[in-house]
Amino acid sequence: MASADAQTVLVVEDEASIASFVAMYLRNAGYVVKVAPTGRDALTLAEAHSPALIVLDLMLPDIDGIEVCRRLRQSSEVPILMLTARDEDIDKIVGLEVGADDYLTKPFNPRELVARVKSVLRRSAPERKQATTTQIRHGLLLVDSGRREVQVEGEDVQLAPKEFDLLWELLDHNGLVLTRDQLLERVWGYTFAGDTRTVDVHIRQLRRKLGEASPIVTVWGVGYKAAPTKDSSKDTVTA
Ligand code: CA
């Protein structure tokens, strides 16, 4: 049962049977659940209820999930878990490219959906916002963890929330290799074996957005690390 301080999850799904099934599992897990059957309803309810997380189906009758995600991202960092109908990479990649945090392919186990929702919410809890700001400079790149801002040669670069977290995790490990499973655990909060393609898709996006300033090195068969650089520093600034 939802307690007074329960977090709200918005479920965007036009198939009533799936929507009610997902809503039931999430309510049993203690969340307040709002259901939107269309993309337009999703945008309206997201505005009205400021949900802690959005479960967003890709195929909707009016505005599709990709476009809903893109519009939400213009003003919000709310975690978004995309549902895709088919196990096709293209759907997943496109979903993540517009700033979704993760995806799940239908048919999915509702317990896995609840586990992922919990993981994502644990990761985005407010305790991550600290009173102090840490900046890491790496070559042309300046990353500010408090403001969650990234600059390349003084120009702002817009990153999706998980892209930022992934970049920070790699830089903060200062050249140490992290495996895909470690990154899933640290950035997405999974304590079980998840789908590591999520990591690869986010890495690809980071490289595309950062261009030559990208510090990310693939360590074949292992994972990823930040490249060593002579011009690297980490400062802790009290806000
Ligand atoms: Ca649908």
Image (cartoon, grey):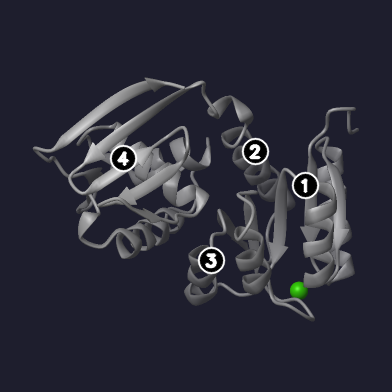
The amino acid pointed to by label 2 is Leu
In front here: 224 or 212? Answer: 212
Q: Quadrant of the N terminus?
A: top right
Q: Secondary structure at mark 3?
A: loop
Q: CA distance from mark 4 to mark 1?
A: 30 Å
- Locate residue 182 relative to residue 75 in the image: left or right: left
Query: Which callout, 4 or 1, points at the residue further toward the start of the chain?
Result: 1
The amino acid pointed to by label 1 is Ser
The amino acid pointed to by label 3 is Val
Residue name at image x 66 percent, y 60 percent: 72
Query: Which callout, 4 or 3, points at the residue further toward the start of the chain?
Result: 3
Q: Position of residue 124 (x, y in %)?
A: 59, 37
Q: Position of residue 238 (x, y in %)?
A: 42, 18
Residue name at image x 48 percent, y 44 percent: 193
The amino acid pointed to by label 4 is Leu
Give residue 170's mark: 4
Query: Which callout, 2 or 3, points at the residue further toward the start of the chain?
Result: 3
Residue name at image x 51 percent, y 42 percent: 188
Residue at numbered disc 1: 50
Residue at numbered disc 3: 98
Q: CA distance from mark 2 to mark 4?
A: 21 Å
Residue at numbered disc 2: 121
Q: CA distance from mark 3 to mark 1?
A: 20 Å
